Every structure is written in C-alpha cells, then in structure tokens.
Image (cartoon, coloured by chain):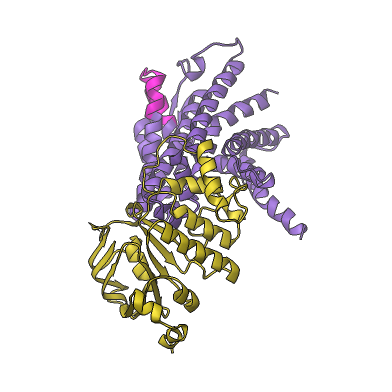
C-alpha cells in the first residue's frame, strides 16, 4: 500500500512537469526537451539554496526564474536563429548539464534533516499524510494559475499561436515573443517539479533529470487520449486530466515494480507503456473501419 | 489609404531560380476603394498583398498605410489597420479554439492581449448578434471548435472577425478559391457588404473573372510584377465581362 501512496505523491510532484509539457507540446506544438536540464536545474537550485539556509519564499521564485531562463533560451535559439525546436532543446539541455554540475559542485547534495516545504505545516502526525495535503494544495494553486492564464486574452492568444500561426500574426501577435514566453513558462513549471521532487526525496542529483521528459510526455499523452476520447474542449477539464495523467503514470510504474519486474527494466517498461498509449487509439480506430 | 512607391521584391537573389516577383511597382489605393487584382499565376499578386500585409518585406521602395510609413514593420504590427482573409480557410482561424475565442482575438486585434478574461456574457451576446446576421444558423454554436465548421462557414466568419475591431484595410487573397459556388457567393456578398458598411479600402485577388467583373470599383491586371492595366470606377463599369476574358486571351 505504501508503494501506491508514494506513487500518488510522486505523481503530484510530477504534475508541474506534466503541465509544462502540456503547454509546450499541446498548446505551442513545440517538441521541447530542455525538460531534462531544467528539471535538474530546479532541483539543483533548490538543494543549493536550502543548504545555504535560504527561506522557501526566496527559493521558489529562484527556481521559477532559473527554469524560465532555460526555456527562454531554447525559445530564443528556436525563433531568432531559426533552429529546429528539438535541436534547440537538446543544445540547452546539454549546456545545462555543465551549469548544474558547476552549481552543485559535486554530483549529489543530500538534504537530510533540512527543513523543506513538507515540514512547513504539520497537519497530521503521519509525514506521508502531511506531504499529501501540502502537495495537493500546491498543485491546486499551480493549476488554478495556469487555468486562469489560459482563459485570459493572453492565454487565448497563446493557444492560437500553436494552432494557426498565420491567423494570430494577422491579429497582431508577435508569435516569436509568444513562443519564447511559452517555453519559459513550460520550463519554469518543469523546474518547479524539480523543486518538489528534490525536497520529497531528500537530495538533488546531477542525473535526476535523465529521461524525465518521458514522464511529462507520458502524462500528457494519457490525458490527450482521454481528451480525444471524450471530446473535451474545456480548458479546466483538460488540465485536470493532465494532472490525472501524471498520477496514473506513476501508478503504472508502481504496479510494474510491485509485480516484481526488475527495477533495471523500469525505463524499458516506461517506454513500452507510452508506446502502448500512443498506439492504442490508432489500433482501435483501424479495427473499427 | 495604401501607398506603394517604387517597390521591388526579389526572391532567391543571385541564384539560378531568382524571381523578380514585384519590380518597381507604384500603387495608390484610396479610402473606401474596392480594388480587384487579376493576373496569371506568378504575376506577383499574392506577393503584392503580402507586401501590404507585412508578411513579406520589400527589397527596396516604401509602403505607407493611412499616411504612416510601414515599410519595415512586421505583419503583427500592421494589424491595427489591416484585416486579412486567406485563400486557405484554415489559415484565417484557429481550428482547435472555439468560435467565441476566435472572435475574442479578433475583437482585440489592434490592442494588447492582456491578463484579464475578456470573454464574458456581454461579449458572447455581441458575437451571437453579429453571427446571426450571416443567416447561417451558427449563432448557437459559438462554443464549438472552429475546426468543426465547413470551409465556407469559416471564411464567412473570418470576414466577420475582420470588422470586430477597428479596421481600415481589408485584404482578400482568393477567399473563395477553395469553396463551392454557393458558399463562394455568400462569402463574396458578405465581403462586399462589410467593405461598404465599414468604408474599408479593400484589395481582392481573384482568378474568378465573374467575381472580378461583379465586385469592386477599380480593377488592375498584373504581369511579371508590374501593373499592365488599371481601370478606374467609370472604366470598370463600362467594361464588359467578355473584355475581361480577352485580357487573358
């Protein structure tokens, strides 16, 4: 049972990454894999500032700013130098590895016995219970902010940028600027996931981001499958499905570990699982023809 | 309203496939003038329209809109004067956004897109009223994604969207090329009515010589990046449809 509780908590930690990927991939239609770097960056900044005894109200804005900067860089390379978004992401991600290592000073910083966001409030004696409520509130606030943003005039313009570029330019929107802001926002969210996970697991590691983009992608693809299935157009409902996708994804991993699959095979299982979700709608579509 | 002075535009300069799309073109379009442009493929019509809209910047020469020099201004900064309808119905609207959200963006074309929610009940009613005037029964579907509509419906809505905010120039790039005859007629009539009602300077590119004959109060023919015929209101009204066919003979 503990297994599944941890999966739920991790899912909540990863929901910010899922929202970030949702913004870059679904709203802007840009395959952004700066993620691996900006996620670690978020974790590194968190660990570094926590060990220096900085308060959380400074750490969180710093994490957001760091992630946004990384995303904005990818956006600048993609729009101003007209470099393929995928390559721009890879470049920034690669460069970030050195940045992260320099910031960290070594490959791993433990945060044992440091106060964290999860020791902020004590609602229950059970630490897991406590963590759950803090995460729930945190994720709800983040989702509300993103949901509101997407409903505003600016948000509609964002959604149109990935949907019909010619139209939105003729309606007076600088699409380059919009994409840079979008990627900054997406990577700021990704860094927030790094912020949460680092405190949740109690350490920051230089390799914590390797392959993390699949977690976000998997969550969004689960959500997208459901969105298409039920023909959902509401922004709010889509966001909730993205969050559920993040949690569901962690549950699937928990189940595979629970039934005794070798932990070394976890990434393979993850890849196959994502492949299955992507191909399932197509396979069922074909058979119905 | 629109002034082009000695405008040149060359694509692929210095290469084997160099194209002089526009060469030394002068054009003045008055307020409330409805200009029809005809010409063979590759004569520079679309490039001319793109130059006015700003999606293509000229190699040399200058462009003025409403007495403001806009020569180097990108398209998104000319939107305060210009509304556009594209040849492809998909280009003028965002398919995954609702009709309402599409109209919201159009309603703030010339303004900043801020961090407040602009889609409220009052705005909804305003959009419903405007759409009802089209007589297509779309006023009850404003929450549907734009992509669920037909090409003709989307073109008609794109036209309507163009006058949601202040607009002085309407650019129509073969707006009916992808439509069936009946939808095409609805779209052309709507365009004509809006141009008159709002006193817009309008430029229409068309390959449909019947439309070129029926609509507009000035017609020019282009070839090889130059204007080779220019008929004003009186000359155009004296024109016969067969004369137009002879232009392409």
The secondary structure that dominates the magenta segment is helix
Compared to residue A59, the image places residue A242 above or below, namely: below
Residue A33 is covered by the magenta coloring: no
- Residue A184, position in %: x, y? 40, 40
- Residue A31, position in %: x, y? 49, 50
Q: Nearer the viewer, residue A229 or B119?
A: B119
Q: Which residue is most to the right?
A: A288
Compared to residue B47, the image places residue B165 above or below, namely: above
Compared to residue A86, the image places residue A124 above or below, namely: above
Within the image, what quadrant is residue A50 found in?
top left
The magenta stretch spans which residues? A43-62
Within the image, what quadrant is residue B70 found in?
bottom left
User: Left or right of A76: which side holds A224?
Assistant: right
Q: Nearer the viewer, residue A80 or A267?
A: A80
Chain drawn purple in the picture: A
- Residue B221, position in %: x, y? 36, 79
Q: Is residue A23 visible?
A: yes
Q: Quadrant of the C terminus of chain A?
A: bottom right
Q: Is residue A28 visible?
A: no
Q: Residue at x 51, y 43 (%)?
A: B126
Q: Nearer the viewer, residue A134 or B1?
A: B1
Q: Nearer the viewer, residue A117 or A289?
A: A289
Q: Quadrant of the N terminus of chain A?
A: top right
Q: Residue at x 59, y 56 (%)?
A: B135
Q: Residue at x 72, y 56 (%)?
A: A285
Chain drawn yellow in the picture: B
């Amino acid at each position: 049972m503990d297994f599944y509780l941890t999966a739920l908590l991790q899912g909540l930690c990863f929901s910010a990454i899922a929202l970030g990927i949702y913004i870059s991939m679904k709203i802007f239609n840009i395959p952004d894999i700066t993620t691996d770097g900006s996620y670690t960056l978020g974790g590194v900044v968190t660990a570094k500032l926590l060990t220096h005894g900085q308060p959380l109200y400074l750490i969180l804005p710093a994490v957001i700013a760091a992630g946004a900067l990384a995303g904005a860089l990818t956006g600048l390379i993609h729009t101003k130098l007209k470099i393929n978004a995928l390559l721009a992401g890879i470049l920034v991600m690669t460069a970030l590895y050195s940045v992260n290592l320099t910031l960290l000073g070594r490959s791993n910083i433990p945060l044992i016995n440091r106060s964290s966001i999860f020791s902020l409030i004590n609602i229950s004696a059970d630490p897991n219970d406590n963590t759950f409520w803090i995460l729930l509130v945190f994720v709800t606030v983040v989702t509300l902010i993103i949901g509101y943003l997407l409903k505003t005039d600016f948000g509609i313009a964002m959604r149109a940028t990935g949907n019909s570029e010619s139209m939105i330019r003729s309606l007076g929107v600088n699409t380059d600027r919009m994409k840079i802001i979008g990627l900054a926002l997406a990577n700021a969210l990704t860094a927030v996931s790094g912020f949460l996970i680092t405190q949740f697991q109690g350490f920051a590691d230089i390799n914590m981001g390797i392959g993390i983009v699949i977690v976000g992608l998997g969550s969004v693809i689960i959500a997208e499958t459901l969105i298409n299935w039920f023909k959902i157009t509401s922004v709010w409902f889509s966001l909730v499905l993205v969050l559920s996708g993040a949690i569901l994804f962690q549950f699937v991993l928990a189940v595979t570990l629970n039934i005794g699959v070798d932990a070394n095979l976890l990434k393979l299982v993850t890849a196959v699982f994502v492949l299955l979700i992507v191909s399932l709608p197509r396979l069922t579509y074909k058979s119905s023809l | 309203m629109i002034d082009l002075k000695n405008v040149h535009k060359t694509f692929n300069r210095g290469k084997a496939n160099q194209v002089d799309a526009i060469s030394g073109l002068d054009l003045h379009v008055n307020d409330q003038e409805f200009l029809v442009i005809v010409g063979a493929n590759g004569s520079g019509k679309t490039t001319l329209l793109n130059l006015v809209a700003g999606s293509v910047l000229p190699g040399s020469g200058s462009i003025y809109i409403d007495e403001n020099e806009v020569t180097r201004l990108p398209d998104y900064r000319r939107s305060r004067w210009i509304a556009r309808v594209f040849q492809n119905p998909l280009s003028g609207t965002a398919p995954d956004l609702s009709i309402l959200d599409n109209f919201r963006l159009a309603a703030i074309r010339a303004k900043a897109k801020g961090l407040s929610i602009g889609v409220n009940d009052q705005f909804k009613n305003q959009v419903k009223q405007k759409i009802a005037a089209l007589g297509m029964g779309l006023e009850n579907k404003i929450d549907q994604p734009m992509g669920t509509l037909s090409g003709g419906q989307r073109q008609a809505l794109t036209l309507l969207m163009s006058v949601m905010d202040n607009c002085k120039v309407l650019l129509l790039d073969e707006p009916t090329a992808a439509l069936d005859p009946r939808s095409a007629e609805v779209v052309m009539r709507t365009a004509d009515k809006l141009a008159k009602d709002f006193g817009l300077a309008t430029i229409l590119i068309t390959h449909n010589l019947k439309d070129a004959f029926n609509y507009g109060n000035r017609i020019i023919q282009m070839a090889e990046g130059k204007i080779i015929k220019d008929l004003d209101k009186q000359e155009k009204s004296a024109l016969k449809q067969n004369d137009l066919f002879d232009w392409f003979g």
